[in-house]
Image (cartoon, rainbow, N blue to C red):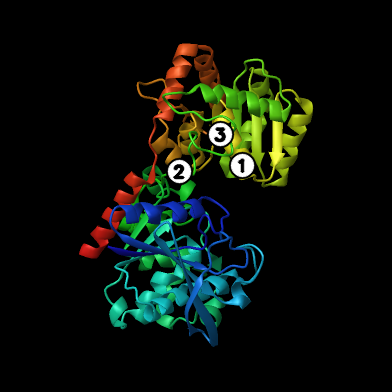
Amino acid sequence: MKILLVASEAAPYIASGGLADVVGALPKALNEQGNDCRVVLPKYQDLRFDRDEQPQFLCWFMVNLSWRNLYCGVFKLVRDGVTYYFLDNEYYFKRSGLYGYFDDCERFAFFSKAVLEALVNLDFEPDVIHCNDWQTALVPVYLNTFYRGVDRLSRTRTVFTIHNIQYQGIYGFSIFDDVLGLPEYVHRVLEYDGDVNLLKGAIESSDAVNTVSPSYAQEILNPYYGHGLDQFLVQRSYKLRGILNGIDNDAYNPQTDESIPFHYDADAPEGKAQDKQALLKMLGLPDNGEPVIGMVGRLVSHKGLDLVKFAADELIQSGCKLVLLGSGEYVFESFFKELESRYPQRVSVTLGFIPDFAHKIYAGADMFLMPSQSEPCGLAQMIALRYGTIPIVRETGGLKDSIRDAGAPGGNGFTFKTYNAGDMMGAIYRAHAAYDDKARWEALVDTALRSDFSWSKSAGAYAQMYADVCKD
């Protein structure tokens, strides 16, 4: 099957979050199963290519966007068996970073329409166009409005993945004519609560919609998680399914990871204890046998950091060390730096995101804390398991689907249900008690190291979804 994966970012070329990891790994896994999956991205200024990689110019054409007539160039690169297309327009994409500009709607409207114009000009006719998040939400809208009369696109199906429903691409209706250039009869497709809602338009226009975990697919049907779209989604739940993301086992491999000083696996796990010693030494923390809790990620409220903030003193005084890496909201950055100043022998906080250091935390920590208020999928808990680090998570979204409580047979972590600091501390106390039982802890680490969250299973589920929409 031929699939074109459309996204605003993809590892290893450019990344701001989990979307890039998905787009970087899923095509390779699909191709290993006999498909032809290709990726199309904007040609950003900040794309990072290897020294021996040189994108090849293929063609150029003009893209009509409302009253604008805009140049688009197409570049091609093949990496690990995956073909990547990069769409070039320096006015929109020769800027620092990816998002956050006043004209983001216009930039990604151009990109969405340019994707379809590229397919008219390229020697590739996909069975399915797979779009991701609001930045590509206009692809199915433009396809249904302008391109169904093009023979090579007349039978193409569309799939749309919601990575986080909180980000919907909501704009005032003044952009409808001036920027999007859509006819009046499409008004109802994009209108929601008096605004243009790009995510809503994609859900309405796509043949199938999925989220990045089965639990999240159910959660967004209720107001607490739906961010205003819950009733709309209930009415279109026949389109909706959930597929749990995977991780790249080559990128996260304690046997070969160059970022960690000692290597190990389930059959020879001794290196993990050495990595813990190396981490504590690097951070200037004493190694007195206490469990180390790691946290890596964005410091934002929906990650559950207000629970950690509320219970921080109790957590530290319970006999745990905390090693944190991340950046985000000032209230959390300042709080955790102040916590470090109060407990310099028990807390280490590094602001920013340093991939090499993140790997050291995954390998050197004993436990990994993710008390998220919401978590569409989450990859960090899977990465932690890959390194034999036991997750402590709240049962929501992908955390619920990937982590089973160690209180039952086959458990691979510790979970709590309600969004409550006391319940979070209860899970931490249970993890600490298991850590103090050496035999039990070794068994837990062994279970973690043998967990399989590779992309092969998830890719099979995506391939089945593609096949299902092509049958209709």
Which of the pair 321/299 is nearer the observer? Answer: 321
Picture layout, residue 172 above or below residue 335: below
Q: Quadrant of residue 468?
A: bottom left
Tell me if mark 2 has few (under 14), some (14-19) or many (20+) residues whose alpha carbon lies within 10 angstroms of its own. Answer: few
In primary-sequence order, the first of circles 2 and 3 is: 2
Image side of residue 395 versus residue 105, left or right: left
In primary-sequence order, the first of circles 2 and 1 is: 2
Q: Tell me the element at label 1.
A: helix
Residue type at numbered disc 2 = Asp
Question: Is the Cβ of the residue at disc 2 closer than 8 Å to that at disc 1?
Answer: no
**Dot 1 corresponds to which residue?**
356
Q: Position of residue 393 (x, y in %)?
A: 50, 32
Residue type at numbered disc 1 = Asp
Q: Tell me the element at label 2.
A: loop
Picture layout, residue 73 above or below residue 408: below
Question: Is the Cβ of the residue at disc 3 closer than 8 Å to that at disc 1?
Answer: no
Pair 3/1: label in front: 1
**Dot 2 corresponds to which residue?**
250
Which of the pair 397/356 is nearer the observer? Answer: 356
Q: Position of residue 419 (x, y in %)?
A: 53, 34
Q: Find the distance from the CA under tag 2 to the CA under tag 3.
A: 15 Å
| Residue that appears at 28% across and 81% down | 151
Residue type at numbered disc 3 = Tyr
**Dot 3 corresponds to which residue?**
362
| Residue that appears at 75% across and 30% down | 340
Can you say which quadrant of the picture contains the C terminus? bottom left
